[in-house]
Amino acid sequence: MAFRKILGSVTYSFADLRTLLAKATPLRSGDQLASIFAQSAEERVAAQLALADVPLKVFLNETVVPYESDEVTRLIIDSHQLDAFAPISHLTVGELRDYLLAYTTTTETLAQLSRGLTPEMVAAVTKLMRVQDLIAVAAKCEVITRFRNTIGLRGRLSTRLQPNHPTDDFRGIAASMVDGLLYGNGDAVIGINPATDHTNTVVNLLHMLDSVRERFSIPTQSCVLSHITTTIEAIERGAPVDLVFQSIGGTEATNRSFGVSLATLQEGLDAGRSLKRGTLGQNLMYFETGQGSSLSAGAHHGVDQHTCEVRAYAVARAFEPLLVNSVVGFIGPEYLYDSKQIIRAGLEDHCAGKLLGLPMGVDVCYTNHAEADQDDMDSLLTLLGTAGVTYVMGVPGADDVMLHYQSTSFHDALYLRELLNLRPAPEFEDWLRTMHLSDDGLRLKQISANHRLLTEVNETYRHPL
């Protein structure tokens, strides 16, 4: 189906929905690299105006990646709920934007709507939004998940404590872990990116994390972010696996490049749930995504990176995750060139994920060769806080010594909680008080008063296991 828009004396034509979505996307370097971007600001405006007039029903009849050849497209179409879609089925994309922003569209309304939205509808409407729209709509959404604690409640901000180490050294990991806990981080997950994906290493790290969690009765969950097949093998060896992690993308070919399929993800979910380790719920999948992953894998099918990203959220949604994380600036300037593009993409990802019913976190980050700095990340962090982001990262000094990129520190989470009056997950908040790490106002106490946690963990992991 072709689309046209006349601006002045110029007629702009767009061959199909995939082209229209790409041309309507705010400028980013990844779409330039793929040669699918609007050639001028005028063409972008024409595409956005044309996109605003597209009826939402069109997205159910025209796919951007063929149904016959892509299991993600089949998942999107086959799982779409027409009853949830019915209240908005008569709208265009532009009218959907107005509907989402309306005072009468409440948190409850958006929760009921989520299963009626396809990723392409959400990608389309977010392309028409300015930054304040992305914040306002996302702030209305509340997505709650549970494993050992409750994530996503309104007025809460959780963090992933990320104690990575370049050689998977247990004492180094333990030191970072204690540091993060003393600063009130880790309620979303204590998650390690292993330097190697060897099963023995992963199993040892899982036992180490679980021993600390159990010793201090920490109401959180742990994860070693290994490939899902390694995690399944670790489960078969009896390892104490809480969350099952995997990076995912928005096309079948992207997921194939990660070494997974929908069937593999289902196998991981079933294996994790078989352990019955959750005490409050069984949301145990942890997914990471990032704009540009499909393009970098040569698996984007001519679809813009924003739309590919939102399609990945449909994959995540199918497996009822505890956490989803857009690692927004990690992939590098080839895909998001500078802070303007990173900030826009982070807010788009968060809003789109929340609209689709996901517990959406954002790794507020950049690589050292991007045109960005920590001031830019402070801006994005603050904007995401006002938008109700579910969780952010807690990295020692904001500088990941294993992955070699810049993220957010333990202190950054404290800043955002203090500024916006946000609290950790309720069960974790109670634990902080029990451990005398915070007072009744949730202000952290002096670290020097917390020798027990620091000394015991340090003694336990003085030597690698």
Image (tube, rainbow, N blue to C red):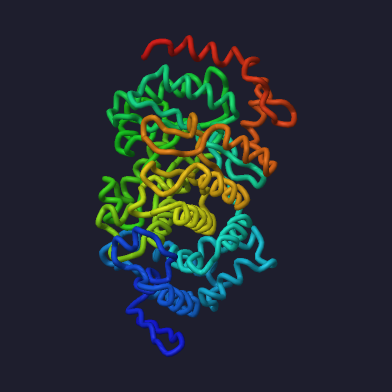
- The N terminus sits in image quarter: bottom left
Q: Quadrant of residue 453?
A: top right
Horizontal and vertical percent position of residue 30: 34, 58
Q: Is residue 422 left or right of residue 257?
A: right
Horizontal and vertical percent position of residue 167: 33, 23
Viewer can see residue 74: no
Q: How many marks?
A: 0
Horizontal and vertical percent position of residue 325: 46, 46
Residue shown at 35% from the left, 46% from the top: 265
Q: Which residue is most to the bottom? A: 9
Decide which of 164, 57 is in the foreground and name it.
Answer: 164
Horizontal and vertical percent position of residue 404: 37, 35
Q: Is residue 283 left or right of residue 452?
A: left
- Compared to residue 321, the image places residue 402 above or below, namely above
Residue shown at 66% from the left, 68% from the top: 102
- The C terminus sits in image quarter: top left
Decide which of 365, 163 is in the foreground and name it.
Answer: 365
Decide which of 402, 186 is in the foreground and name it.
Answer: 402
Viewer can see residue 216: yes
- Compared to residue 139, the image places residue 74 above or below, namely below
Q: Which residue is most to the right? A: 440
Q: Quadrant of residue 111?
A: bottom right
Decide which of 57, 446 is in the foreground and name it.
Answer: 446
Residue shown at 30% from the left, 38% from the top: 229
Q: Is residue 263 left or right of residue 377?
A: left
Q: Is residue 22 left or right of residue 196?
A: right
